[in-house]
Amino acid sequence: MDLEERLAVFIDYENLALGAREHLGGMQFDFGPIADALAVRGRVVARRAYADWSYFDEDRRMLTRHQVELIEMTQRMGASRKNAADIKMVVDAIEMAFERDYISTFVMCTGDSDFSPLVHKLRELNKRVIGVGVEKSTSRLLPAACDEFLFYDRLEGVEVPDEDQRAPAPKRGTRSRKPAATPERAATQKAPTTSRRAKAAEAVAEAVAEPAAPAAVEPEAETKPATRRRKKAEPVPAPVEVAPEAEIDVAEQEDEAPASSDAPMEVRVAQTLADLQSSTSGPVTASALKRTLLRKDATFSESDYGFRTFGEFLRFLADRGFVELATGPSAGDPEVSLPEQGDTDAAFGLLRTVVQESGGSAALSGLKNAVRKKRPDFSEKALGFRGFLQFAKAAEAAGTVALAWDDDTDDYLITA
């Protein structure tokens, strides 16, 4: 634990939120993908976001769910306070650099080049600096000043709409307003959700059982042209006889749970392992993988999936070809790696196989989840595509599948 990086995150929220709305098709900014990317780089000990929060009412709950401290910098004070949030952010970062020696890495979430002097000063103080920003709203000067820079729109979990599907971006400086309630949203809010333990039991039963037809899953954000809708409530699954603890507890509402907890167990492990392999130079051990999974979701436990130890959990995944295990530095702590994923042509072939197994044609919505059932570590971003729709279009251009818009289903239809 003493060798782990300690990270402090500072968020220039107006820069990121407005950058996402203006340059990413009006999409809502989500801190979740950033939190997951930082989880594989070390232990985050401080998270602060700076803004006039009267302009971002809808975003408060999302940030609070990720344990981000909201620093209020009111702009309407009868005088110009244009750089008030920036100055406060700089002062707090320098103060933390001097007062907390154990913090080794500072994460500056902004694309503003005005923070370049701060980045240089932190590096003079022997601190590592990671920058995060929206690609099209990030100054060219800032990434070069950092030790590492992450573009938000390239992170796993950020689904950027295609150019022809983007909604018009709101004007800069306008207040965030909640959309009017619709019967669909009202039904979504009233529908009961299943407990995390029940979802875990269902995932285990699904993994052990014979492969079935892919279930309908909420559509990806990029697959719906020109609109962005809240996902519909999922029907309560049928009871799975795994253990008495797997019974559904309707009282346990999961509205505040991170989105990553909804992913199947093998997908969560594969994504985390892929991130660790790309961010570290050495092999990944089981203990390091377990620590990172806990950073992403502090409630994670292999016992929720019916396993006594994490090693038993990994052996189950290895037997099914999801991961590979090798002798580690100590007994009981094996090295974990992913099987070779192959090139783009192999990924196109995998997509074609999944479509053929679905009867020769399938809607784009939910198809990515069906692909991940066969290959949990699948990621179109790792292959250089910004989203799954772009990946599907590339597969069509290669002659692997056919892609066409279907008005009846209000979705793209892929045939093989």
Image (cartoon, rainbow, N blue to C red):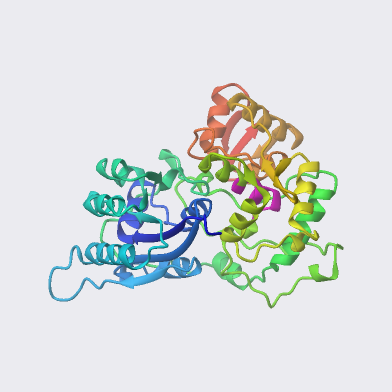
From the viewer's side, name the closer residue of 177 and 117: 117
Question: In percent of the image, x 66 and y 32: which residue is there?
Answer: 351
- Residue 9: in magenta span: no
Expressed as whole percent of the image width and height from the top left, the position of residue 271 reads: 60, 46
Expressed as whole percent of the image width and height from the top left, the position of residue 123 reads: 30, 50
Residue 322 in view, yes or no? no
Residue lying farthest to the right in this orientation? 241
Expressed as whole percent of the image width and height from the top left, the position of residue 246 reads: 79, 67
Q: Is residue 206 left or right of residue 339?
A: right
Name the image quarter holding residue 201: bottom right
Name the image quarter holding residue 10: bottom left
Residue 127, placed above or below residue 79: above
Residue lying farthest to the bottom in this orientation? 251
**Image: magenta residue range:** 263-272
Residue 109, placed above or below residue 356: below
Residue 100, placed above or below residue 137: below
Q: What is the chief secondary structure element of the magenta stretch?
A: helix
From the viewer's side, name the closer residue of 279 and 224: 279
Q: Quadrant of the C terminus?
A: top right
Q: Quadrant of the N terminus?
A: bottom right
Expressed as whole percent of the image width and height from the top left, the position of residue 211 reads: 81, 43
Q: Is residue 194 left or right of residue 47?
A: right
From the viewer's side, name the closer residue of 127 and 80: 127
Number of numbered discs on residues: 0
Question: In percent of the image, x 27 and y 71: which residue is there?
Answer: 73
Residue lying farthest to the left in this orientation? 79
Residue 253 in view, yes or no? yes
- Residue 269: in magenta span: yes
Name the image quarter holding residue 191: bottom right
From the viewer's side, name the closer residue of 155 and 129: 129
Residue lying farthest to the top in this orientation? 399
Residue 359, placed above or below residue 57: above
